[in-house]
Structures are given as structure tokens and as C-alpha cells.
Image (cartoon, grey):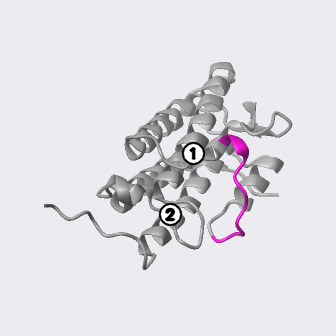
Amino acid sequence: MTASVRQSEQRAQWLTDLGDVGRRVGEVAGSLDRRQLDWSPPEGGWGVGQVLEHLCLANDSYIERIRAALHHARPRLPTDDPGWRPSLMGGWLARSITPGTRKLPAPRIFRPAPHARPGVLEAFLHGQRALVDLVDTASRFDLFHSRTSSPVTRLIRLNLGDCFAISIVHERRHLGQLERICANSAFPGPAQAH
């Protein structure tokens, strides 16, 4: 079983991770034009826009679950700083999507359309800010005993902290994918001004 960590320490780490991922995704995708966002690798797989769309879909579903769980969560005393550890299923899910693990098919509800929505990077960064706000709000609640279900299936029960941890690990995994797509030798350069 994973050792518990003080919830204040874990929240601080999540805030650092969210800031890092948001900054790095902005660096990778911030200057891309629509043609580059819509490009897909010739060997198959998603392009940058589809990865960002996938992250938006996943994050939005977790944000919805987190907000609902916080609404029903058990407040804790301001002097308490209880431990947090992943639940059995939450820990398994986070480990299964850790960067460098084998490729997994995306659940149907997280599959992007062939072309991402307009402003997909801004939508992703908006979701990042929402997650940061929710991590801050969660400081008033017990992350271990507050429960919700996975957005994919109600059969998987998660604690509130699992939702944050899974979202962040998932983003890190796809940040690596974004970097690999942009490093592909066939990736189009910026459009030339006429």
C-alpha cells in the first residue's frame, strides 16, 4: 500500500505540477497555427489539436466530478492536516497512465473528433486554471474520505485526491506525446506569410 502524505504537501505538489504542465503545453502548442494543430502523423495517431481536445474532454469530466464531490465533502478543522493516499483503484489508474507505460485506448467519452474545437489550447489552459482553483478549494476538505466515481464508469470509486492525481498524471503523459508529435520530421513548419 502507498504511504500517506500530508494533504497540504500533496496539494502543494499538485499546484506545482499543474503550473509546470500548463507552462510546457503553452510552450509546445502556443505558436502553432491551425494547419499544424490539425496535422496528424503519417504513421497514424492523433495530432496536437486532437491531443489537446482529448485533454479538455478528460479534464472537464474530472472537474465536474471534483466540483460535485467538494459540494458533498466533509469539511475538516483548519488545524487538521490529515494524510492522503490513493485509493486502490485510483492508484491503479494513475500507475496505468504514467508517462512511459504502454499505450492504452482512450475511453469513448474522451475520444476527440478529427479536428479540435477552435481555441482548443485556450480551452485546455482554462481547464488548468479551474483545476488550480479546485486544488485550492480542496484545502478545506478531507481528500481521502471524500468520494466520487470515475467519469468512465460509476463502478470505479475514487477519493477526491485520486481525481487530482489522475488528471495530472494523464496530462504529463500527453505532454510527452505533444512533444513527440512536434518533433516528428514530417511535422509542418509555420505557414509562410505572403
Q: CA distance from mark 1 to mark 2?
A: 12 Å
Looking at the rendered structure, the kind of residue marked 1 is: Ala
Looking at the rendered structure, the kind of residue marked 2 is: Ser
Give the quadrant of the C terminus. Answer: bottom left
Image location of residue 99, percent across then percent down: 62, 66
User: Which residue, given by chain and number where applicable, does mark 2 sit on?
Assistant: 40
Question: In the image, what residue occupies the spot 69% across and 23% down?
Answer: 74
Image location of residue 161, percent across then percent down: 66, 42
Membership of 36 in magenta stretch: no
Q: Is residue 51 left or right of residue 183?
A: right
Height in image: 22 above or below 135? below
Q: Quadrant of residue 57?
A: top right
Q: Residues within 10 Å of mark 1 (few under 14, many from 20)?
A: few
Judging depth in this view, the residue of 22 and 134 nearest the camera is 22
Q: Is residue 156 left or right of residue 185?
A: right
Q: Secondary structure at mark 2?
A: loop
Q: Which residues are magenta?
A: 100-109
User: Which residue, given by chain and number where applicable, does mark 1 sit on?
Assistant: 113
Question: In the image, what residue occupies the spot 75% across and 53% down?
Answer: 93
Overall secondary structure of the magenta stretch? loop
Dot 1 or dot 2, earlier in sequence: 2
Question: In the image, what residue occupies the spot 56% across and 60% down?
Answer: 46
Q: Which residue reaches farthest right?
A: 155
The reply to whether residue 141 is in sight is no
The reply to whether residue 101 is in sight is yes
Membership of 101 in magenta stretch: yes
Give the quadrant of the N terminus. Answer: bottom right
Q: Quadrant of residue 160?
A: top right
Image location of residue 151, percent across then percent down: 71, 36
